[in-house]
Amino acid sequence: MSATNQESTHWVSVTALIFCGVVAAMQLGKVAIGAPLLQEQLNFSFSHIGWLTALFSILGMLGGIPIGTLVMRHGQRRSVILGLLILAFGSLASTAGTSIAWLLAFRMVEGLGFVLVIVACPALINRATHPRHKNLTLSLWSCFMPFGMCISIFIGGWFTNWTWLWWLCAFLPLVALALVLRFTSPPPADLVFPRFKEIAAQLKQLLSTTIAPVFTAVFALYSLMYFALFSFLPLLLVERMDFSVAQAGYFTAFAALANATGNLGAASLISAGIERGRLLLIACIVMIACGISLFFANPAPILALVLCLVFSGTGGLIPATVISSVPRIAPTAAAIPVTIGLTMQGSNMGQVVGPALVGSSVEHFGWHAAGIIILLSGSFACFLILRYLSKDTLGK
């Protein structure tokens, strides 16, 4: 096979795997855009909607390392295939009932499929990628969440019945499955998967280092800051800037999409020689500045929108930098899934803690409390970066 053909095969495989991530992220976004339909057609409360959303993050927070261990034991490609099948089944089965207990039960099923896909895909992308493209492909992978969320928000607005949206989200994983089967290669027949004893030794080695827990903590603090703003951005725009609900929704989707520009920019900046620790530090400082300006300075609407875009876009540098560092943090290439699981647990912890902490604080102390949370979280992240990551030990 020629070099050109090899390059083409590589990009097709990577694209198929990134599409798997986008489809998985749509399962998270469908509840946000489907909330009005669920309230209208099933009489769900805000609390019900909140639990449907939170289950994904809670499963990721608790199951990242255990599921990463299973992925290492049974193989990444098998795990992606199984995860996509579970996503399709969970979304389709949800439409067979109308009670909150029924939807929550199959939301947990969807969550399992989501974690399997998100933990296994980066290892397959790393294996399929030429060394000179690893920073780029893993940064492209980190775009799966903003792209999936935005697609859900925009497409979801076309539906007038919640079951139609759930049916679409059951069909798309099957499309992704067909692409995986067609464009990714199965592991060699003689490949021996590690035993649990070997996996435990690698996990112990991973956790015994400083750098992996620090990257995980920074990822958690980033998620806390990001969701501290974006979980309540539509409400902020409506209450303080007189946006309509529709206008607030469209802008929130656009601002979330800006996060992908930071994901993509990280690859170019790392390849240009900027240290990963410095990149993380700059992103945290900018997020702090934008966050406290939004919540303390009460800026004019146009300036507030610019601050949101800068907050989101610059913040996107962080997940891409963390994810692209995973192959260097992992003790071995086979340990990439459990390393992704560790960092994902940090990310999901921020997603769970951020909205809950901000919601309670704003309710009791006003919008300024959200600014204080962003300031404290960002400052702690800066401390960790300066203390442990100021000298880049990972290379480009």
Image: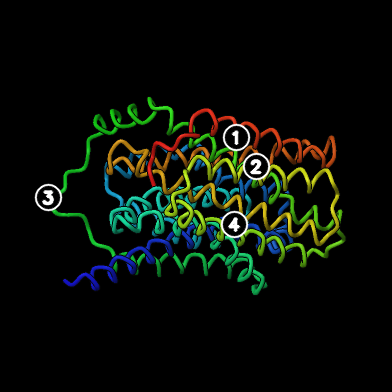
Q: Which residue is mark 3?
A: 190
- Residue sticking out furthest to the top: 208
Q: Are marks 1 and 2 in contact (CB under 8 Å)?
A: yes
Give the spatial CA distance, label 1 vs label 3: 46 Å
Nearer mark to the viewer, of 3 and 4:
4
Give the spatial CA distance, label 2 vs label 3: 49 Å
- Residue sticking out furthest to the left: 190
Element type at mark 1: helix
Few, some or many C-alpha atoms within 10 Å of disc 2 (few <14, some 14-19, many ≥20)?
some
Instruction: Give the amino acid type for the residue marked by disc 4 in the picture.
Output: Asn
Element type at mark 3: loop
Comparing 263 with 178, the one in front is 263
Q: Residue at x 25, y 29 (%)?
A: 197
Q: Which residue is mark 2?
A: 285
Image x and y of residue 35, in percent: 68, 59
Q: Earlier in the sequence, mark 1 or mark 2?
A: 2
Nearer mark to the viewer, of 2 and 4:
2
Nearer mark to the viewer, of 1 and 3:
1
Element type at mark 4: helix
Few, some or many C-alpha atoms within 10 Å of disc 3 (few <14, some 14-19, many ≥20)?
few
Nearer mark to the viewer, of 2 and 3:
2
Q: Which residue is mark 4?
A: 259
Q: Which residue is mark 1?
A: 382
